[in-house]
Image (cartoon, grey):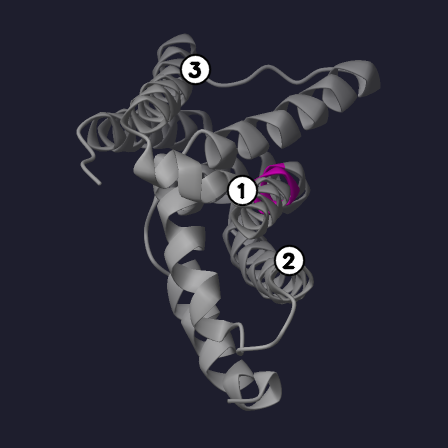
């Protein structure tokens, strides 16, 4: 089947995947609620760059190695679980001390870089991402098409769609920012977000292929 004919199914699948709950969704919602729409942008971009790296890794055969190698899978699983649990503990700590302190422009810049790196790390350390790209993209690469170039193009479409979706979601949550950034609400939100992230970390740790 021609690639153009496969695109509607690909786009629909991407939208359904984007809307499904998971570490990316939890992280974006927490960042958008606490820091506003702009504060969630670096997190979204980091997550999507991580996804694109996994897609290229799948096209090059590395992601398949992770998917079939017990050692690589376990290492990635442990790292991913540790990252999510650490983020959850940090959110708990923020709830305990009463929220995030406002800083100057230099601090804000460092914070944006940290959120970008945080998003990318969450995606790259997710073993499910490796399994997903290995199983997902080959379905939409027509026979005779170059695997690497076609996967890279499809991944770019996915990244574009997901970025738009997640930024729209972050914007909607950010619109209610005044409510979320009330001290009492913010502390409760951090506590809930911390619990969700720790739970996701535990789930990743228990993941079986």
Residue at 55% x, 33% y is 119
Camera-side residue: 164 or 121? 121
Query: Which residue is label 1 attached to?
Result: 32
121, 194: nearer the viewer: 121
Q: Nearer the viewer, residue 188 or 9?
A: 9
Q: Label 1 neighbourhood size at 10 Å, few (<14), some (14-19), many (20+)?
A: many
> Spatial distance from mark 2 to mark 3, Cα to Cα?
43 Å
Q: What element carries label 2?
A: helix
* Quadrant location, the C terminus: top left
The mark nearer the N terminus, 1 or 3, is 1
**Element on which disc 1 rests:** helix
* Picture coordinates of residue 131, whole percent (x, y): 36, 47
Is tag 2's residue or tag 3's residue first in the polypeptide sequence?
Answer: 3
Circle 3 residues within 10 Å: few <14, some 14–19, many ≥20: many
Q: In this view, does 137 lie to the left or right of 107?
A: left
* SS for dot 3: helix
Residue 82 in the image: above or below residue 204: above
Q: Which residue is drawn at 51% across and 76% down?
A: 11
Residue 148: assigned label: 2
Image coords of residue 61 (percent x, y): 52, 45
Asked if one can make out residue 181 in the rendered structure from this viewpoint, the answer is: no
Q: Could you give the CA–CA distance between mark 2 and mark 1, rounded to whole angstroms? A: 34 Å
Residue at the spot of label 3: 94
Q: Where is residue 198 in the image (x, y as percent from the top left)?
A: 27, 24
45 inside magenta stretch: yes
**C-alpha separation, residue under disc 1 versus residue under disc 3:** 15 Å
Q: Is residue 106 left or right of residue 43?
A: right
Q: Quadrant of residue 109?
A: top right
What stretch of residues is rendered in magenta? 43-48
Task: State which quadrant residue 72 falls in.
Answer: top left
Q: Main secondary structure of the magenta part?
A: helix
């Amino acid at each position: 089947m021609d690639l153009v004919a496969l695109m509607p199914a690909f786009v629909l699948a991407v939208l359904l995947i984007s809307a499904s709950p998971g570490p990316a969704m939890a992280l974006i919602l927490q960042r958008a609620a606490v820091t506003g729409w702009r504060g969630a942008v670096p997190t979204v971009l980091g997550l999507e760059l991580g996804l694109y790296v996994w897609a290229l890794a799948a096209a090059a055969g590395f992601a398949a190695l992770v998917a079939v190698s017990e050692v690589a899978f376990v290492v990635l699983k442990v790292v991913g679980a540790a990252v999510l649990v650490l983020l959850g503990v940090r959110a708990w700590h923020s709830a305990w001390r009463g929220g995030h302190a406002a800083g100057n422009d230099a601090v804000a810049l460092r914070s944006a870089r940290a959120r970008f790196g945080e998003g990318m790390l969450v995606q790259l350390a997710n073993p499910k991402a490796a399994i997903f790209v290995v199983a997902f993209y080959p379905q939409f690469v027509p026979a005779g098409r170059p695997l690497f170039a076609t996967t890279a193009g499809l991944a770019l479409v996915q990244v574009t769609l997901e970025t738009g979706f997640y930024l729209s979601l972050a914007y909607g949550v950010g619109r209610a920012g005044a409510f979320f950034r009330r001290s009492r609400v913010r502390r409760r939100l951090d506590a809930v977000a911390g619990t969700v992230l720790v739970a996701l970390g535990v789930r990743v740790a228990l993941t079986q292929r």
